[in-house]
Structure formats: structure tokens, C-alpha cells
Amino acid sequence: MFLKRIELSGFKSFADRTELEFVQGITAVVGPNGSGKSNISDGIRWVLGEQSARSLRGGNMQDVIFAGSDARKAVNYGEVSLTLDNASQSLPLEYQEVTVTRRVHRSGESEYLINKQPCRLKDITELFMDTGIGKEAYSIIGQGRIEEILSTKSEERRGIFEEASGIVKYKSRKKETEKKLQETEQNLLRIHDLISELE
Ligand code: ATP
């Protein structure tokens, strides 16, 4: 599975619709300081579900929308789409290509789409879980991240290996099930209380 295309529109410095095509092998993005290279990787992480505005180098989520320049007016929404080759069926969808889109409006409203079908953020997060390309995955190593990984606590470092080995999905399902179990136990307790009150 590899990233075939990224389309950015109204996202950070990309006011106009900009499309970047990737081919097999290594692609290097070069350009002067401040020209928007990191905005591309921010866009990738954003589509994959990044919810921290700070880690996208903004104050709030609307800061990712093109804010205007001397030559251009600000726009009302920002959008990024990633198209992944899925010939290997690494993503559990029966499509040869999968396009994931995220859009945010100035009003704060967000939209998520998988192959143009509206979905929830959770669907996107789950789609990429354990594939190695989730927002926390090791496939995107930001500036300073290598140092951070090396100096981080051993439990956090373990998280990186867990994602790589594909067990995060099961851990997350276990957590959800444990939560449901706890809620059910609480409900049972309440029912017992009610029964003993009625007896
Ligand atoms: P460096 O080589 O210094 O790391 P870079 O090429 O990675 O730079 P970026 O950090 O990706 O550059 O881009 C920074 C530019 O993006 C700045 O000029 C900033 O003004 C612009 N920018 C960021 N957010 C927005 C926004 N919401 N609207 C308009 N421009 C933005």
C-alpha cells in the first residue's frame, strides 16, 4: 500500500486546489523555508485524524484553513484528500484505491469521507489502525520526532512497537469492551437495588 495522491484545498498555505502525485520509490519535497513543505505532512496527519491543533502548529482547528495573504482573500473551508493504492487489500475495503477526505469549515463543522461517502472520524481511525499509517504511526516522523522517540519513556516507546506489530486494534477493542462491561455491571447493581426495594 502506498500513498498515490494528496489534494489540498484551502488548507494552510494551499489556497488553491493543489494536487501532488506520488510514484513508487522515494519522493523528496524541496523548497525554501516557509514554502509549505511541512504543511503537506500536517495535511496527511490531519486527514488521518490528528485532533491536536497544537501539533498542527495552530491555536485551534480552524487555523488550518487558509487565512488569506496580501494577494488572496481567506477561504471558508479547508480540505485534504489522501488517495492510497489498495491493490494489496491492506485496508479492509474492497476497492483498489481508497480516498479519505477531511474538511473543516470556519463555523467549526467537520466532515469526514471515505471514497466520497460521509463517515465518522472513528471510521477513519479504525480503517488505519494497525496498518502503520495512523496519525500516531511511525510512518510520519516529524522534525525532532526521532529524538523524542529515543528519549521518550519506555511505555510510550512500547506503544510505537505495538502499533507496528498490529495489536493496537485489539487493545482498543478490549478497552471499549471493558468499558461496556463496567457499565453493564453498574446497571446490574442498580437493577438489584430496585428488586430489593420492591421485595
Ligand atoms: P521550513 O523549511 O522552514 O520548515 P516549510 O517549507 O516546512 O518551512 P511550512 O512550515 O510548511 O514551511 O509553511 C509555513 C508557511 O505556511 C508560513 O508562511 C505560514 O504563513 C503559512 N501558513 C500556515 N498556516 C496558514 C494558514 N492557515 N493560512 C495561510 N498561510 C498559512
Image: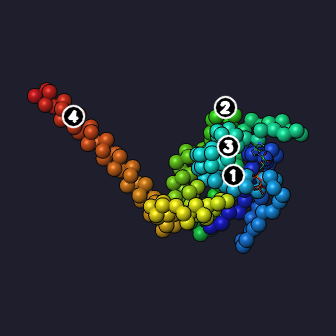
Circle nearer the viewer, 4 or 1: 1
Q: Which residue is mark 4?
A: 191
Q: Secondary structure at mark 1?
A: helix
Mark 4 and mark 1: Cα distance apart in space: 49 Å
Between 21 and 15, the one nearer to me in the picture: 15
Disc 3 crowd, CA 10 A, few/some/many (<14, 14-19, 20+): few
Mark 3 or mark 2, earlier in chain: 3
Q: CA distance from mark 1 to mark 2?
A: 20 Å
Question: In this figure, which residue is indicated by the disc labeled 1?
Answer: 43
Q: What SS does tag 4 mark?
A: helix
Q: Residue 107 shows which numbered tag?
A: 2
User: Residue 138 in the image: x percent, y percent?
Assistant: 58, 63
- Residue 178 at x, y = what percent? 34, 50
Q: Amino acid at mark 4?
A: Ile
> Pointer 3: what residue?
58
Residue located 64% across and 39% down the image = 60
- Mark 4–mark 3 distance (CA, rounded to whole Å): 48 Å
Residue labelled 3 has its Cβ within 8 Å of some atom of ligand 1: yes
Image spot of residue 135 (x, y percent) = 58, 55
Q: CA distance from mark 2 to mark 4?
A: 43 Å
**Scheme of image coloration:** rainbow
The residue at the point 60 percent across, 49 percent down is 50
Q: Look at discs 3 and 2 and give the one toward the viewer.
A: 3
Q: Is residue 142 above or below residue 188?
A: below
Give the residue type that dot 3 points to: Gly
Q: Nearer the viewer, mark 2 or mark 4?
A: 2
